[in-house]
Amino acid sequence: MRRLAYILSLLVLLLTLSHNMSATVQSRDIIIIDNVEHRLNKVLLYQLDSVTYDALQTKLEFGKSSYSANWRGHISTFEVKDNKLFLNSIRTSGTHTDFKGLLDKYMDKKGRVFASWVSGTFICGTGECIYVARNGFDSVYEQETELVVKNGVIVSSRTYTNKTYGAINLEDASRKISQAFDLSKINAPKGRITVKIDASKFNNEGKVTEWSVEFLRRYDGLSAEIIEKIVKEINRVFNLIDWKTYCRDGEWYWIAQDGVTYPLIFQ
């Protein structure tokens, strides 16, 4: 029975991890910087006023081009030129580059669409995608450029390189955890104690060295001694695995950013 309880607990853990890694990724807009395509973390057309956006939506038929990885129905390509941001094209069922009658108020003397409606801080990624976020827009790429834009003008720009550590194989992780977890010496009340586990400390290489443990259920009846033993055992077992982590702009993160919910069964 205890073995079965461990297996059921592992299923919860693995399903949570799978959800973090396999959700549908939304297609991102493109920005060209120094002739290199990057993926944007924001949809810049959303900053247009509603009248202009609705006109584009109707004329270019955004709705007909909507699908699971692109609910908005369009992908825009922007480019940085002369320290300014320009709209090159909008792709729906086809690629549109002629915006006369739609974006006239944003056109310069050369007929280019100057994206003066855009302001904010944006992350532009290129290279390999090293972490896939659930919404896609917060995914992490090997190299990223942070752009600060005000009314279409590039105020500042900086580029940094990201990296990963370790690897995660769900079958290996489940086997190691199921074989290593030992709750027999922890004299906790019988039943289920649900905890949330997340990475809290990393070494310089990116290996997780300490885990945070948040008690979600059956917490009130536990003594300080039992809590300390449970946290110690969780840290011991989870540290046996070289979980995949990634470094973004100098900060390390676990691949399961929201942590995992894990029920411990005491019998």
Image: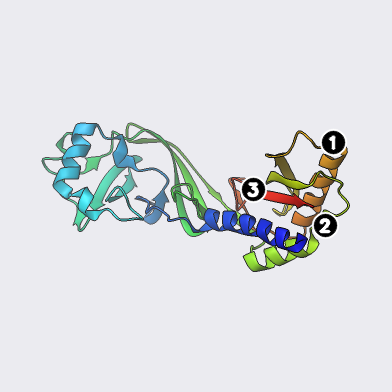
- Identify residue type, mark 2: Asp
Nearest to the observer: residue 102 or residue 160 = 102
What amino acid type is highlighted by mark number 1?
Ser
Q: Above or below — where is 231 with respect to 165?
A: above
Q: Position of residue 198 (x, y in %)?
A: 67, 46
The picture quadrant where one finds residue 111 is top left
Q: Which residue is mark 2?
A: 182
Callout 2 environment at 10 Å: few (<14), some (14 to 19), or many (20+)? few
Sooner in the amino-acid sequence: mark 3 or mark 2: 2
**Residue 13 appears in the rendering:** yes
On the image, the x and y values in percent for residue 213 come to 73, 42
Residue at image x 17%, y 49%?
Answer: 60
Q: CA distance from mark 3 to mark 1?
A: 21 Å
- What residue did someone put label 3 on? 261
Q: Which residue is mark 1?
A: 223
Q: Secondary structure at mark 3?
A: strand
Question: How far apart are the alpha carbons under marks 3 and 2?
Answer: 18 Å
Q: Nearer the viewer, residue 45 or 67?
A: 67
Question: On the rendered structure, is 168 left or right of 47?
Answer: right
Q: Which mark is residue 166?
A: none
Residue 75 shown left or right of residue 192 in the figure: left
